[in-house]
Amino acid sequence: MLQSRQSGPVLTLTLDRPEVRNALSAELVGALTEAVEAAGRDESVRVIVLTGAGKAFSAGADLSALQALMTASAEANLADSEHLARLFEAIYTSPKPVVAKVQGHAIAGGCGLAAVCDLSLVADGAKLGFTETRIGFVPAIVSVFVVRKLGEAAARDLLLRGRLLDADEAARVGLVTRAVPAADLDAETDALCRELATETSASAVALTKRLLADVPSMGVAEGLSYAARLNALARATDDCKAGVAAFLSKTDAPWRSRG
């Protein structure tokens, strides 16, 4: 269901339900949420990679399970929805950078899963899109993050029409970071993870992710006040002190040797 493998500072989480195109069952959502939250607390993990087994990254919601839930109570349906929302929030707010390695199609909630990651590399043959409205459903949870990421006009185009994009267009509109040749996906992902693990400070990345999550909902004055406090907090961290000292003495920052 979910495979976990750590190589040095990089933890790879693989959705492993290829027989149903890695559809997001309640069990898989729970396992992935727990794994992401645990990785956020694990100092040995610097980068989390999310990928899928088989030909698809993820087809989104498990539609057979969704159909069964249609006869369940409103409370049961709300609990199931909140279960998925917790996963997206865990990825978005994790103190560790999360990289999506999208080796195949990412549809509906699967596309949302790729989009909510901090960075996403997509094989050039993959298709992505939010197809919920084409089956009478609503891209509700993913919309919170897609509107933030793309702005309202681009989000309306994707969410209302339910159309599929190729990897190049997805990168061009900003839904994902970059489209790469399928043969290069592993190497490109490894290089990106190596950069994140050895060239950046763990504490600085965590604080920057907090900044990016919190600031968009603030007004200008509130945002500037919050940013000033975070700026002051960052100056007191061991990594900032060590990084500035290393820069001035023209030596490597300590996290480079730890990578």
Image (tube, grey):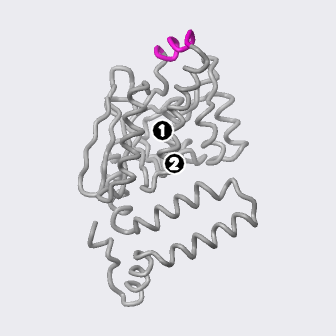
Magenta stretch encompasses residue 66: yes
Q: Residue at x 28, y 36 (%)?
A: 3
Q: Position of residue 36 (x, y in %)?
A: 39, 45
- Seen from the viewer's position, the closer of residues 44 and 107 is 44
Quadrant location of the N terminus in the rendered image? top left
Q: Amino acid at mark 2?
A: Tyr
> To which residue does mark 2 refer?
92
Position of residue 234 in the picture relative to residue 140 (left or right): left
Q: Amino acid at mark 1?
A: Leu
Disc with the residue nearer the chain's start (2 vs 1):
1
Q: Residue at x 46, y 68 (%)?
A: 204
Is the magenta region chiefly helix, strand or loop? helix
Tell me how far mark 2 sits from mark 1, CA to CA: 9 Å
Quadrant housing residue 56? top left
Quadrant housing residue 254? bottom left
Task: Please rate how many residues cluster around mark 2, counting C-alpha atoms within 10 Å: few if below 14, some from 14 to 19, many from 20.
Answer: many
- For residue 20, above or below residue 184: above
> To which residue does mark 1 refer?
87
Q: Position of residue 192 (x, y in %)?
A: 37, 57
Magenta stretch encompasses residue 206: no
Quadrant location of the C terminus in the rendered image? bottom left
Query: Could you tell me which secondary element the residue under label 1 belongs to?
Result: helix
**Total number of numbered discs in the rendering:** 2
Q: What's drawn in magenta, residue-wise?
A: 64-72
Task: Please rate how many residues cluster around mark 1, counting C-alpha atoms within 10 Å: few if below 14, some from 14 to 19, many from 20.
Answer: many
Query: Could you tell me which secondary element the residue under label 2 belongs to?
Result: helix
- For residue 82, above or below residue 184: above
Q: Position of residue 208 (x, y in %)?
A: 52, 63
Position of residue 41 in the picture relative to residue 259 (left or right): right
